[in-house]
Image (spheres, rainbow, N blue to C red):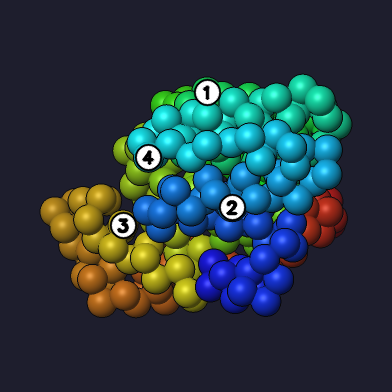
Amino acid sequence: IQCFKSAYLVQSTFRPVLLSLGLCLGNEDDVPTSLKMLREWLGEDSKFSALVKQYVVNADVKKDAQKTEEMLKRATKASEKDVDLWVAQGGACIWSGNFEGAGSAFAKAINLQPSDPRLWSKLGASLSKAGKHDKAVQALLQALEIKPRFPRARANLGSVYIDQKKMIDACQQYMICLVLNPKCSYVWDILSEDCGFSASKPELHKAICDKDKHQCMRILSMPNPAELPRKGSELSAAQAS
């Protein structure tokens, strides 16, 4: 996120950065700025600049998110083949709490670009927020079928497994996430607070408290996640051999 913020300071009209900030800043409890970035992103498209100029920000964040969502819906109706518009609409839906709408928007994006693992991961996350955990798992596994070394999808899958009370499965996904991206240190807090291993698996609980991923993987009898293929095609080839 910091890289996107820095890029925005250098060039505040660069649409890929605006869209990325619009989709991620809300995760840092900055939904108003996420919505602002989504509107700026839309306004940089000449087809929709007049629509954005008419927009009046609402001080109520939820209402502001709903208004931004409606504006993006108008844009997607005018340009239904634009994947990024569907993604932006999905982001606005999440910030407004319309998780069903987010899932529908991301599904539309996937219909246009089915080989993009990021879209499957976003769909999985929105389905999870909507309480559709089984469908969320399916979407996230599809993301990982395309890109096995995808930390965000691994973390999202771990979160769904916690909701399903599949704590060992969740721990395995978070361990893979940590190996692939050591900066995902927040997962240690999730594991120690939500998985409840202190009574059932005290050795694993201690390893989690010590933030010892190698010990965790040993206890879980996990293969080395660093050996995962980078693409799903490599995984299929390895399985075939």
Mark 2 and mark 4 lie on one chain; the one further toward the N terminus is 2
Distance between the alpha carbons at the discs numbered 2 and 4: 16 Å
Asked if disc 4 and disc 1 are in contact, CB closer than 8 Å, the reply is no
Residue at 23% across / 71% down in the picture? 209
Distance between the alpha carbons at the discs numbered 4 and 1: 24 Å
Left or right? Give the position of 168 relative to 100.
Answer: left
Tag shown at residue 59: 4
The three-letter amino acid code for the residue at tag 1 is Glu
Residue 52 visible in this rendered orientation of the protein: yes
Q: Which residue is mark 1?
A: 100
Mark 3 and mark 1 lie on one chain; the one further toward the N terminus is 1
Q: Which residue is mark 3?
A: 190
Q: Residue furthest left?
A: 199
Which quarter of the picture shows residue 219? bottom left
Q: Position of residue 80 (x, y in %)?
A: 82, 27
Distance between the alpha carbons at the discs numbered 2 and 3: 29 Å
Q: Which residue is mark 2?
A: 37
Question: Which image quarter holds the C terminus?
Answer: bottom right
Q: In the depicted view, which residue is nearer to us: 43 or 221?
A: 43
Question: Which image quarter holds the N terminus?
Answer: bottom right
The three-letter amino acid code for the residue at tag 3 is Ile
